[in-house]
Image: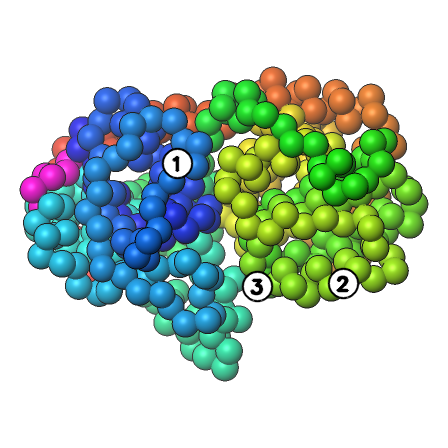
Amino acid sequence: MRIALTSESYLPYLSGVTVSVDALARGLGAQGHEVLVVAPQAAAGREIVAIGSSGPEPGYAWLPSYQLPAVAPAGYRMPWPSPTAEAWRRAEAFRPDVVHAHSPFVTGLLARRLARRLGVPLAFTHHTRFADYRHYLGVLAGPGATLTDAYLGRFWAGCAAIVAPSNDLATEIRSRLPAVRRDRVHVIPTGIDVEAIRASARIDPRPVAGWPSDSVVVVSLGRLAPEKRPELILDTMERIAAEEPRARLLVVGGGPSEADLRERAEGQRLAGRVAFTGQVPRTEALARVAGADLFVFVSRTETQGLVLAEALAAGLPAVAVDGPGVRESVRDGIDGVVVTAEPDSTVAERLATAAMALLADGGRRTGMAARARSDAGRFAVERRVAEMVEMYRSILPGTFVDALA
C-alpha cells in the first residue's frame, strides 16, 4: 500500500505526536509499504535526526513553515496554510491509497483536500486533548474551546476512520458522534520499539548527579509545562524525602516550567535530592530513565501516555495517577501502582505512599520490574502497525466523500 501521513508537528521537534508519526512511518516501511510524510519543514540549519524508531526513512513532502510566538514550544514549526506547488505536486504524484492525518487543522485540511482530489479514504488519529491546552488562550479560552469542539465534529464527519490511542479516548469520541458513525472509531495505541529499548544502554544517574551509590531513584519523563502538572512531581518528592533519606528524583525533559521547578528544588526540603536533565535527545532520555528504580507519571492530559509504555519496557515499575489510557499501560499490582485522581487535594500523598511502599520493598519492586520487561511485547510497534494496516484495508473498498456538515 501507499500511505500519505500528514502532521502539524514533526521532527526535529520532539513530542508524543512526532514520535508516533515517525514510529508509524518507519514501521509501515519495515512491513513493505510505501510512505510519504507531509509535514512542516525544519528551521534553516536544523536536520532530521533518528530518534530510535526502526525501519526505513520515509519520503517527504516539506511544507513551508514558521516559528509561532512565545506561547508555542521552542522549535515547534507551524506550516503555512497553503503548500508550495512542489509539495502538492509530490503528494499528488505519490498517489496514496489512504491519506492519514495526524492533526485536524492546517495539515488536516490539506489531507482532506488531497484525499478528495484523489478519491481515496481519509483516516485521522486524535493525538491531543485540545481542551487541556486552552489556558494558553487566556481570556479566549472559553470561546476557543467551544469553537474547537464544533470544528472537530465537522472534521470527524469527513473521515472514513478515526483512530484513538486509548479506549478512554475512543469512548469519549464515540459519545460525541452520531450513532451511525461510531463504528468509524478504532482503538490503536502508538507502538514502541520494545527490543531496542530493552537493549539500550543505561545511564546511572547517581554518579552524574553526585548522589550516594545506595540512592533509590524516582524518575519522570516528559515536557515540563503547566498542562502536564510537573509541580505534582515535586509535591510528591517532598513527601517521599521526609520519610526515605535514600530517595532522589531525576526529572528528564524540558519546557516552560523548568526554571520555576529548578528554583523550587533548591529549597530546604529538596536541596541536593533533585536533578534535571533539561531537553535531551530521545535515546538519551530513555537511557536515563532506564538507569532509575521507579517511574512516576502525573499527567492527565494524555491520549495514551506513551512514556509509560517506554518506562515499563525499560524495566521500571510505575506509579501513576489514574487518567486516560493509564490502566491500558500500567497493570495495577502487576507492573506498577495506579492511584486515584480524586480528590485532587491529596493526590500527592497517595502518590508518595505508593512510591514509598515500592522503594522500601526491593523484592516487590524487582518482581514488578521483571513483569514489566517480560510483558512489554504488548506495546510492540510491529503489532500496532499491523493493526493500522488492517484498519486501512477496512476502509479501502469505497471512496469516502462525506461533505462537511
In the picture, measured across the screen, residue 110 lies left or right of residue 92, that is: right
| Nearer to me, 147 or 157 | 147
Q: Earlier in the sequence, mark 2 or mark 3?
A: 3
Q: CA distance from mark 2 to mark 3?
A: 14 Å
**Amino acid type of the residue tagged 3 in the rendering:** Pro
Q: CA distance from mark 2 to mark 1?
A: 34 Å
Q: CA distance from mark 1 to mark 3?
A: 25 Å
In the picture, measured across the screen, residue 68 lies left or right of residue 29, that is: right
Q: Alpha-carbon neighbours of circle 3 within 10 Å: few (<14), some, or many (≥20)?
A: some
**Amino acid type of the residue tagged 1 in the rendering:** Ala
* Position of the C terminus by quadrant: bottom left
Q: Position of residue 28 (x, y in %)?
A: 29, 29
In the picture, measured across the screen, residue 107 lies left or right of residue 361, that is: left
Label pair 2/3, CB-CB below 8 angstroms: no
Q: Is residue 75 visible?
A: yes
Residue that label 2 marks: 264
Q: Alpha-carbon neighbours of circle 1 within 10 Å: few (<14), some, or many (≥20)?
A: some
Q: Residue at x 76, y 49 (%)?
A: 274
Mark 3 lies on a secondary structure that is loop
| Nearer to me, 79 or 122 | 79
Q: Position of residue 207 (x, y in %)?
A: 75, 36
Q: Earlier in the sequence, mark 1 or mark 3?
A: 1
Q: Which residues are magenta?
A: 92-97
Mark 1 lies on a secondary structure that is loop
Residue that label 3 marks: 256
